[in-house]
């Protein structure tokens, strides 16, 4: 599996954070992470490129128009979640995707800074 940093998603997340579209939650990401049904509902109304913007990683071995291509979700299709960024950072570190880990950490710091204002 060849997962690379999705730079468009990082830029999108930065903009969402700047716009205050954040959840500074301390819960468990499993409670906020959209399930397959939520993903499908989102895709009924949005393009795959918009879906991709909610994932920090992309697997180049998967087709561009498949959900399986996109990895490391960080939000609920409305807001950036603190616990989503933490989960993405931890999973990326465990799997050796240091560029994704670093991007998730930078986004997490930006979110926490915005939330403190």
Image (spheres, helix red, strand yellow):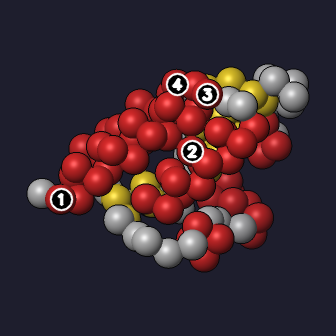
Looking at the image, is mark 2 or mark 3 earlier in the sequence? 2
User: Which secondary structure, mark 4?
Assistant: helix
Looking at the image, is mark 3 or mark 1 earlier in the sequence? 3
* Residue 98: image tag: 3
* Residue toward you, 97 or 35: 97
Q: Are marks 4 and 2 in contact (CB under 8 Å)?
A: no
Q: Where is residue 105 in the image (x, y as percent from the top left)?
A: 45, 40
User: In the rendered view, would you say 79 is above or below 18?
Assistant: below
Residue under label 1, please give it: 116
Q: Quadrant of residue 92?
A: top right
* Residue toward you, 89 or 15: 89
In what quadrant of the picture does the N terminus appear? top right
Looking at the image, is mark 2 or mark 1 earlier in the sequence? 2
Which residue appears at 48% of the width and 32% of the height? 103
Q: Can residue 41 be seen in this snapshot?
A: no
Which residue appears at 50% of the width and 51% of the height? 85
Q: How packed is label 4: few (under 14 Cα within 10 Å), some, or many (20 or more)?
A: some
Residue under label 4, please give it: 7
How far apart, in angstroms, are the residues tagged by discs 2 and 3? 9 Å
């Amino acid at each position: 599996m060849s997962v690379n940093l999705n730079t468009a998603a990082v830029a999108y997340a930065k903009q969402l954070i700047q716009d205050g579209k954040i959840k500074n939650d301390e819960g468990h990401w499993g409670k906020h992470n959209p399930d397959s049904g939520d993903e499908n509902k989102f895709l009924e109304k949005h393009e795959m490129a918009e879906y991709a913007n909610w994932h920090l990683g992309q697997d180049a071995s998967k087709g561009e128009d498949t959900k399986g291509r996109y990895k490391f979700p960080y939000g609920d299709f409305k807001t950036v979640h603190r616990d989503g960024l933490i989960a993405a950072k931890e999973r990326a570190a465990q799997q050796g995707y240091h560029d994704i880990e670093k991007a998730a950490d930078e986004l997490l710091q930006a979110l926490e800074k915005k939330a403190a204002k």
